Image: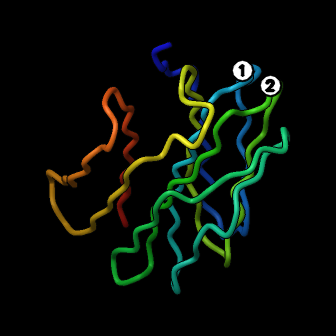
Amino acid sequence: MAWSHIQTPAADINNAVTSGAATFGSNVTSGSLIVVCASMFAAGGSNVSSVTDTLGNTYAQDDTVTYSLATCRQSIWRTFNSGAGANTVTVNLSATSDLTFTISEFGGALTTDPNDASNNASGSSQTPSVSVTAVDANVMMVGAFSHDN
């Protein structure tokens, strides 16, 4: 079965918070892959300490990059083989920060750990890029970017 994008709600919490939540617009399908892409901005550089949801899924961190004088971070987390039903995802932070994030549901992904490669980069460019070499054929790649202004 080929993978497919199902839905991607977002949360933009431009206040000093230690967590934020977003709810999927429709029920999550059993076996889905859920990917969380979070951006934080705070003096001292808050980080995502955990991601939880109301279906009891377990999230793993795929990658985090720090940039802009250590005040900004971009972090990607995922859970695979999700349970089914209404779902609210909460991003928990290690310290107070502004927080923006998306939660994306994908169908047709592997129901065993689907991550086979990751990479990150930071800098100042109008054409950012990063190189990732997938181990397996027919993979889905998820990317995220952020900025400090």
Label 1: element kind: loop
> Counting other residues with Cα less than 10 Å from the Cα at mark 2, is it few (<14), some (14-19), or many (20 or more)?
few
From what the image shows, is residue 38 above or below residue 4?
below
Query: Which kind of residue does numbered mark 1 sit on?
Result: Thr
Q: Is residue 129 above or below residue 139?
A: below
* Frontmost residue, 63 versus 25: 63
Q: Residue at x 38, y 56 (%)?
A: 146
- Quadrant for residue 10, please give it: top right
**Observer-nearest of 143 and 110:** 110
Q: Which mark is residue 29?
A: 1
Q: Nearer the viewer, residue 87 or 134?
A: 134
Instruction: Write the residue at 19% across / 66% down.
Output: 124
SS of the residue at dot 2? loop
User: In the figure, 5 relative to 114: above or below?
Assistant: above
Way the structure is coloured: rainbow
Identity, as a three-letter code, of the amino acid under mark 2: Ala
Q: Which numbered marker is on residue 84?
A: 2
Determine the residue positioned at 71% across, 23% down.
25
- In terms of depth relative to the viewer, which is nearer, 31 or 127? 31
Do the CB atoms of the residues marked 2 and 1 lie less than 8 Å apart?
Answer: yes
Q: Earlier along the polypeptide chain: callout 2 or callout 1?
A: 1
